[in-house]
Image (cartoon, helix red, strand yellow):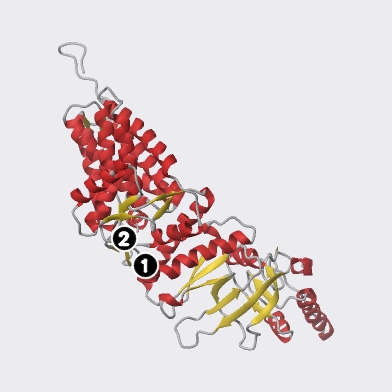
Amino acid sequence: MSDGAGKPPVVIASEQTSVTSGTDVQEKLISASQVFSNLLKPTYGPRGLDKMLYKTDGNTAITNDGAKIVSELLVKHPAAKMLVSMCESQEEACGDGVTTTMLLCGSLLQEASTLLRKGLHPLTLVDGYRASLSAAISQMDEDAQEVSEDRVVAVAETALRGKGAEVALDLFSSLVVEALTAVSSSGGEPRADKVSMFKSGKGSLRASRLIRGVAFRRRVPLDGLPNNLEDAPVAIMGGELKIRSMTRDAQIQISSADQLDEFIGAEKSRKDAISDALIATGARVVLCGGEVDKEILHRLADEDILIIAELDESEIRNASEATGAEVNDSVLDISPEDLGICGLIAWERNEATDMVEDIIRIDGCHTPGVVTIEVGGDGKEATEEVIRGIHDSLRATSLALEENQVLPGGGCTHSRMADAVRREAEAEPGRARLAMEAFARALEVIPSTLVENAGGNPLDHVLELRAASRDGGDLVGIAADGSVGGVDDAWHPRAVIQAGLESATETAMSMLRIDQVISSRGD
């Protein structure tokens, strides 16, 4: 700009900087979000399809998990990055509902695009969306149900549907509930991080089972070590079982055979002291986080003590929580009170495979703070997808148990929230009413997508569902085959639905408040 004729303009940015203003900004942001939303739309629901991801390192993955797909995408568009952040927040908070959140945000922005073209101010849209969110949450308060035994199993099954684990839905849902119940009965909180996953690489998915303890792959150092130990006391060492090496170089000058014998004898005495300290505790199993000296190993083996070495930090921690044993850093300070108990510890050689590690299972722990779901099947991509589904189910089920509130699935909750928003809009005299009606239509993208992915007619079924929600009778939603019916077998934790709706609405409102995009790259 210039203060008068003949004066040069004041340049505040480089020449390649481009500035987009007005309604073009919202249209570009909405278009980008729509592309992202359409990418995940076919994967939604029990009849959703999978995506094959070909990674930059040449590996492939087959999944319909929204969080997995979003995490693998290398996005560049600023609007897409906002959506990625939204999805990451949802995954971190709830562990489920990422695709639902993305669909809602895309639908909210698409409805806003129509009203913006008609001249509605963006802040009017924001006000209407905020009022609609409040009405939707109030409807959740009315529809929320307390957790029961059947509903907990239904929550686990709902999170597993549409994924690789659905081939053994009854088995995995019962394993999820059993795992969290085992942790809870031991006095711990039924959290998903208290349940580990272990791929056996053998059998079929139906061979999966719950281990009331831990399992890991490590090489058993000697064939003659004891196996199938029952009610065995367990000692856990965080460090190595050997004489520590000197941190500085040193030379020892020996001038006679007697001095050599004394040196060797002193070293052996130190090793015997380490062995004797472990033997004196009465431990029959020793788990170690570092290397084990060969002489100590053979001494313990002579006493029929099973020793597993070179476990990583997480395996040491999980073994401690499962058996109740204390992790000791110094073997000379260990006492019988530091030991834990496992019901059964068994190891299995893998002689006929390419794996050099053996499978060690610590099962039957009396009060396990950590349990493990052992997943069968030898398919790499398929097993990984099953594990992702189980993890989502664990997160959802633990949220339901923690919050003690669930909401009906199958689009039932979103349809009832849409009806509540429409009723609230009737009392709105201003233009914000248009935004509230748009919010209600956006909520119906959930049942609409369920019907569409099941091969049905979205319009007819959504209208039927809208009428059923308006009548306020029984809970009705979209069944697995795309028809309108009861949803007694589909339940979600309230936190998943509420957090997803709040994240989608806040992200959509943030985008609508943007009136200029300034790009220093010129694109």
Q: Can residue 105 be seen in the rendering of this structure?
A: no
Horizontal and vertical percent position of residue 493: 44, 50
User: Looking at the image, which is closer to me, 272 or 474?
Assistant: 474
Q: Residues within 10 Å of mark 1 (few under 14, many from 20)?
A: some
With respect to residue 164, does 132 lie above or below? above
What residue is rendered at 72% in x and 69% in y?
A: 250
Horizontal and vertical percent position of residue 320: 65, 65
Horizontal and vertical percent position of residue 20: 21, 32
Q: Are marks 2 and 1 in contact (CB under 8 Å)?
A: yes
- Quick one: which residue is furthest to the top in this view? 4
Horizontal and vertical percent position of residue 209: 50, 73
* Amino acid at dot 2: Pro
What residue is rendered at 81% in x and 86% in y?
A: 257
Q: Which residue in the structure is indicated by mark 2?
A: 46
Q: In terms of sequence position, does the residue under pointer 2 or pointer 1 come before the other? A: 2
What residue is rendered at 35% in x and 30% in y?
A: 131
Tell me if 313 is positioned left or right of 108 in this view. Answer: right
* Amino acid at dot 1: Glu
Name the quarter where the N terminus is drawn: top left
Q: Residues within 10 Å of mark 2 (few under 14, many from 20)?
A: many
The residue tagged with tag 2: helix, strand or loop? Answer: loop
Q: Which residue in the structure is indicated by mark 1?
A: 166
Q: Can residue 418 be seen in the rendering of this structure?
A: yes
The residue tagged with tag 1: helix, strand or loop? Answer: helix
Q: Quadrant of residue 489?
A: bottom left
